[in-house]
Image (spheres, grey):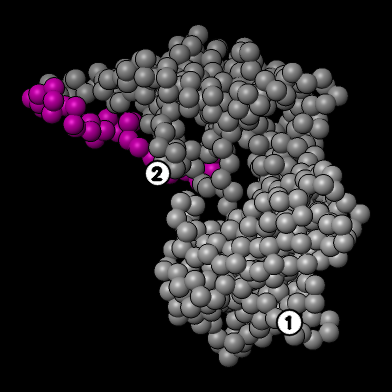
Amino acid sequence: MTDMGYKVRRLSPAGSAVRVLWGWLVVFLLAGGCAGSYTGWETEDTAPLSAKEMRAGLRALLTPADFAECEALPDSQKSEWLRIFWQKHDPTPTTTENEFRREHFRRLRYALYYFSNPFGPIPWDDRGEVYIRYGEPNERTFMLNDFWDRRKALGIRSARLKGLSPTAAAERDFSEDAPGLAVSGREKSMSHDAKMMTNPRGPNGEVWYFYRFGLTFQFQDEEGLGIFSLVPYTDVFGSQDDYPEFVRTKITAVDLQPAIYLHDYGTAHLDYALDLARFRAPGKAFNVDVNLGYPLAELTRGGPDSAMISIRRVVVIRDDSLHEVAADLSILSRRVGASNGQQQLLVEQKIFNLPPGGYELSVAIEDLFSGKKGIYKKCFRLPEFITREVQEISDIELASFVWSVYEPGSPYVKSNRLVMPLPSHIYLQDQPIAFYYEIYNLAMNDRDTAVYSIKYEILDAQAKHVFHKENAGRFFSAERDVCQFGTIGEADLKPGEYLLSINVFDETIRNKKRTLTRFKVIPAGGRTGSRD
């Protein structure tokens, strides 16, 4: 976590016996009356929380729409709703630890311990509400014992003594005239809160600065009870923000703002290519190809004279309810040659067999020599089988090449061809565009033969202009489901983004079907795929 900076402004109190009495009453309530069985913010997530505390925490955590949806559920369904919510927001979905959930409960317990409010509708004051939603401020300023009124009076007095105009006085810092107003150095821990809370003399104002969000919040303890309310931001001479603007900011920045958590992965990001291709499998299931491409130029070798790279890869697939249905962990270590540019990829493919339904794919990659990490999540759906009368085309699996000759036991083999996946969908300007796809449910004629023709087109990214058109031929098959390979080598494309269109015409029933995929062409100068 980021250390919080503090500025504490102090002024000798004029305190009264009433203020001291109120101060000790607040200390008593905070220490015993509000926390109940709760003993400290460092307590583990399993520490008991009341229904009121949990509900207030959820309200600060969720969007208004999500909170209303959760509130409308019967108690028997809320835990499942929350389990799915936590899983969706897990910054490291391939691990058992959910840092987002852990951070939320840390903030909640911190708010209960340091910003407790025994008199309000929620168990913390406005500081706690902001803290749960935004976390630790980058800087925090305390004002002690009527600081603003005294600071304003001091400014007027000093301005008169020095003969300054009101304008000059507004630009002058008079701290040197009152050492008690001097700003202290930065603190390193929010544990300072405990000392400030138990001091009956203050503080009675705070300003929190969130530089990363461009926000400033000011809080005021108007009754001297240690309970702080959000108020319009005030500078040291007493001028205030426009009140209607403050109300609008409060609504959008606090009341409607769900909790923000920016996870620190503690290392540089590792970029990689990922592509999914879905193909029908026996038994009304699908084979889902998860194709990964690791840029060799970004991977660290295992020493100055070593050509060894080592990657830890985790793939996790969850169903619509975010229960884990498939997982695979692999350590990929091998010697590779020198990289020839950013587009040279080390390719890996993992195939999962799944029934129809909705899924979430999570992939985590770690370079074991540099510590760089890359985490990716993607939702996809496998459609239900409709009928045998509906013609369909699978996804298009782009490839760096398709070979008819391969060694027994080779990976990447489909229908007796070696199809080397190209997860990046990036081709060099002089590189043939290769691909694999499947056609399902072709109609059979009176000779039990499927007759179909195929046409390929390359269009611009908006599908408005055709750059290349090619008739792939007329085909005959004794099967209704067929595998197809294609290569376009003479498109003569300029660098840019394009669409590959595959058009199938079933001649038996005069039916047309079309599918598309995107790809990119870059200037020649390096390879886009590697078998190393």
Please tell me whether residue 55 is drawn above or below residue 305 in the rendered image.
above
Residue type at mark 1 is: Ser
Please tell me whether residue 386 is drawn above or below residue 337 in the rendered image.
above
- Is residue 10 highlighted in magenta? no
Please tell me whether residue 60 is drawn above or below residue 500 in the rendered image.
above
Which residue is located at x 78 percent, y 41 percent? 320
Q: Position of residue 43 (x, y in %)?
A: 73, 38
Which residue is located at x 53 percent, y 71 percent? 427
442 sits left or right of 395 in the view: right
**Where is mark 1, residue-wise?**
404
Q: Quadrant of the C terminus?
A: bottom right
* Residue 39 in which image quadrant: top right
Q: Position of residue 451 (x, y in %)?
A: 76, 62
Q: Which mark is residue 185?
A: 2
Judge by depth and name the residue closer to the eye, 330 or 531.
531
327 sits left or right of 403 in the view: right
Tell me the distance, in whole angstroms, between the alpha carbons under discs 1 and 2: 72 Å
- Report if residue 318 is visible in the image: yes
Residue type at mark 2 is: Gly
- Report if residue 271 is visible in the image: no
Q: Which residue ends up furthest to the front in the rendered image?
A: 446
Q: Of marks 1 and 2, which one's residue comes earlier in the chain?
A: 2
Q: State which region is magenta.
A: 162-190
Judge by depth and name the residue closer to the eye, 304 or 430.
430
- Is residue 182 highlighted in magenta? yes
